[in-house]
Each structure stands twice: as structure tokens, then as C-alpha cells.
Amino acid sequence: MLGSVAAAIAAGAFAVLSALGASTGSVVPAKAAAPVAVGSRSVAFGNGRVVLRMRTSSLGCFRVVVGSSTVARSCTSSLAPDQIAYASSRYAVGGVAGSDVRAVIVRLTNKGTVWAALRRGTFYVAVPAEHNVRAVVKVLSNGSRTSFTVTGSR
């Protein structure tokens, strides 16, 4: 049950992210995979975390937190099993992932690549000081990959 709740929360968070125009590349919102409970949760990744808050059954927002500071945020209204939603900053990239997403890769400047930690339908990666984020890549269960270019000052 916890897995389905995590997938449902991730589904809601993605759609809110797209709706507010955050850095989602060319991700198109889709219908949520399952109903989502209103509430919030925080998933820790060492010094960072992704905090997800469902405002309604189909509208959720998430924050990427490093230490005690929110470094990125976004909202989404739906997330299909094969989609991700993310928010990025100079310090970290985090977001939510559908149940068919097996990995998230963050491509950096200066030939850097970091695999994000994926936990409970969320993902997070700290961005090393000497790099900036170039792209976020989702890897699905079937091995296919889709890359989303990250633009703007990071």
C-alpha cells in the first residue's frame, strides 16, 4: 500500500510542477495514475530532502531543501507512471518520479554526471560547486531514456 500511495503522491506532484512552469523540459502533464491523499511528507537524502505537499487529490507542490534552506520548488497536477517532475537550482535537483521510472541522471557542465538517489517516488542530487545543471535524464524500466534540457541561470 505504501508503494501505491508514494506513486500516487508523485503523480499529483508532477502535474502541479508543470502547471506553474517550473523547469520540466518538455514534460507534458498526464492523468494521475491513482487518487492521491491530501497531506504532506518529507523524504530525506542526507543533508537534502524533497518535501511534498498535496493541496488536493490532483494538485501537489514540492520543495527541494538543502540543510534548512529551500533551494527550488515547483507544483504539478498529475504524473503518469513513466514521467518525472523536477525543480533545479545551483545547489540541488529534486523531484518526483512515476512508478515506471528506474533512475534519474543529472548531466552537469564540465563533463559531470551524477545519478540521483531515488526513494519513495522522489529523487534528489546535490550539485557539486564547480558544476551547473545541463540536463535531467529519466530512465524507464524498459531501458529507454529521455533527456530534458535545463535552461536559465543555475
Image (spheres, rainbow, N blue to C red):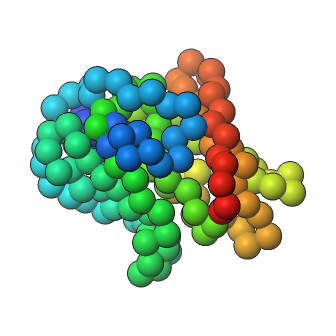
Closer-to-camera residue (89/106): 89
Residue 66, image x and y in percent? 49, 73
**Residue at 86 percent of width and 57 percent of height:** 110
**Residue at 20 percent of width and 37 percent of height:** 58
Residue 144, image x and y in percent? 62, 21
Residue that lies at the very extreme toward the bottom in this rendered image: 68
**Residue at 81 percent of width and 55 percent of height:** 109
Task: Relative to 118, say whether 101 is above or below.
Answer: above
Residue 27, image x and y in percent? 50, 31
Residue 142, image x and y in percent? 56, 18
Hey, which quadrant is residue 2 in on the image?
A: top left
Using the rendered image of the protein, determine whether residue 105 is visible from the camera's viewpoint.
no
Closer-to-camera residue (54/144): 54
* Quadrant of the drawing holding the N terminus: top left
Task: Relative to 84, say whether 49 is above or below.
Answer: below
Q: How many marks?
A: 0
Hey, which quadrant is residue 89 in on the image?
A: bottom right
**Residue at 40 percent of width and 33 percent of height:** 98
Image-based side of 66 in relation to 151, left or right: left
Task: Relative to 78, say whether 60 is above or below.
Answer: below
Closer-to-camera residue (49/93): 93
* Quadrant of the drawing holding the C terminus: bottom right
